[in-house]
Image: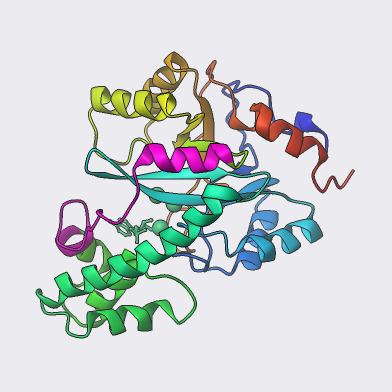
Amino acid sequence: MPMSLFPANFTGDPVPLGVDLHMHSTASDGALAPADLVGLCAERGVRLMALTDHDSMAGIDEAHDAASRLAIRLLPGTELSTRWHGINIHVVGLLPQGASGALALGLQSQAEAREARAVDIARRLEKVGLHDALALAREQAGPHRPLGRPDFARALVAAGLVPDITTAFKKHLGNGKAGDVKAYWPAMSEVVGWIVDSGGVAVLAHPLRHGLTRRKRGLLLDDFRETGGQAAELISGFQNADVTRDLARQLDERELYASVGSDFHFLGGHLAPGSMSPVPRTAVAPVWTHPRLAGFLQSANDPA
Ligand code: AMP
Ligand code: MN
Ligand code: MN
Ligand code: MN
């Protein structure tokens, strides 16, 4: 697969790029097993993908086997939970060399943080009437993966306390609500360091999804860049074209690379692997042209 299949810049061509660098599997809160997710990517014409489960790389080996069979480029990745000025900020690590050193330890501590946080969330949800909250969330998640807020959301729905997942987040788990427990996550700057020291590219995930003003988003991007972050998601799923152009300006000013991803979790919603708003014409460089990734794309499992 020659490099030219992944454009060196964004020309504003509306044709899908065949690139999706943000997706979830059953290794975190996604519905598809890693191999099934890769299979769906192949069906949908995604040729370069990253599996970015929350605080975990447990699905990477399975995904990699499937990707090799289907001649898809798989970038190992993860989406790490962090804290920045009291906000829960997600940082995607694109990790051509996998996780080593501080990041390997960090993934362990994130899993432990998730378990401790789940106990805390459960205690808080008991107070709004979800009895046995921890066991109910575990029932939703199954035995194999660390608990996340969606497991508590489904438990609240199953118990009849809220009509649907959206309401569960709106009333109990979303930003600023009782079940939104951030204290367990490390500082954004620390997590960026883990990724960079592992030879990876740190990507600020979905910068438009925090309800920040343009100015505050600029401060976030400044801090992210200053602590060594190299890229941000210019496109996350579907978003307004004017807002995208404005975000592109903010990335350009800071010489951040642009990543694109669907943030796909499950079928049946409006998202699918590779489905996202088109990238407008912009001077911002695609993240796959970053020196740390370009080499990986030229050499790794080249189907020729
Ligand atoms: P956690 O990683 O455990 O903090 O849970 C955050 C996850 O919950 C996100 O990655 C989404 O998958 C999901 N989520 C967040 N907000 C909502 C929402 N309003 N409705 C549905 N799912 C959500
Ligand atoms: Mn999620
Ligand atoms: Mn996220
Ligand atoms: Mn995500």
Q: Pick the quarter of the image with the N terminus.
A: top right
Image: magenta residue range: 170-197
In the rendered image, residue 196, in percent from the top left (x then y), is placed at 55, 36
In this rendering, does residue 279 appear at all? no
Question: Left or right: where does residue 248 sit relative to residue 218?
Answer: right
Residue 202: image location, x then y, percent: 51, 37
In the rendered structure, the answer to whether residue 27 lies left or right of residue 95 reads left
Quarter of the view holding residue 291: top right
Residue 249 vs residue 301, the one in the foreground: 301
The residue positioned 22% from the left and 74% from the top of the image is 122
At 58% from the left edge and 47% from the top edge, which residue is drawn? 274
Taking the spot 36% from the left edge, 23% from the top edge, the residue there is 222
Q: Is residue 238 left or right of residue 179?
A: right
> Which of the 4 quarters of the picture holds residue 149?
bottom left
Report if residue 192 lies within the magenta region.
yes
Reply yes or no: does residue 109 show up in magenta.
no
Quarter of the rendering occupied by the C terminus? top right
Colour convention of the picture = rainbow
> From the viewer's perspective, is residue 225 above or below residue 193?
above
Query: Which residue is located at x 75 percent, y 33 percent?
Result: 295
Residue 202's place in the image compared with 218, above or below, is below
Residue nearest the observer in this picture, 173 or 118: 118
Q: Where is residue 181 shown, x and y percent of the image? A: 23, 58
Q: Is residue 207 above or below residue 57?
A: above
Residue 19 location, x and y as percent?
A: 62, 41
Residue 96 shows in the view = yes
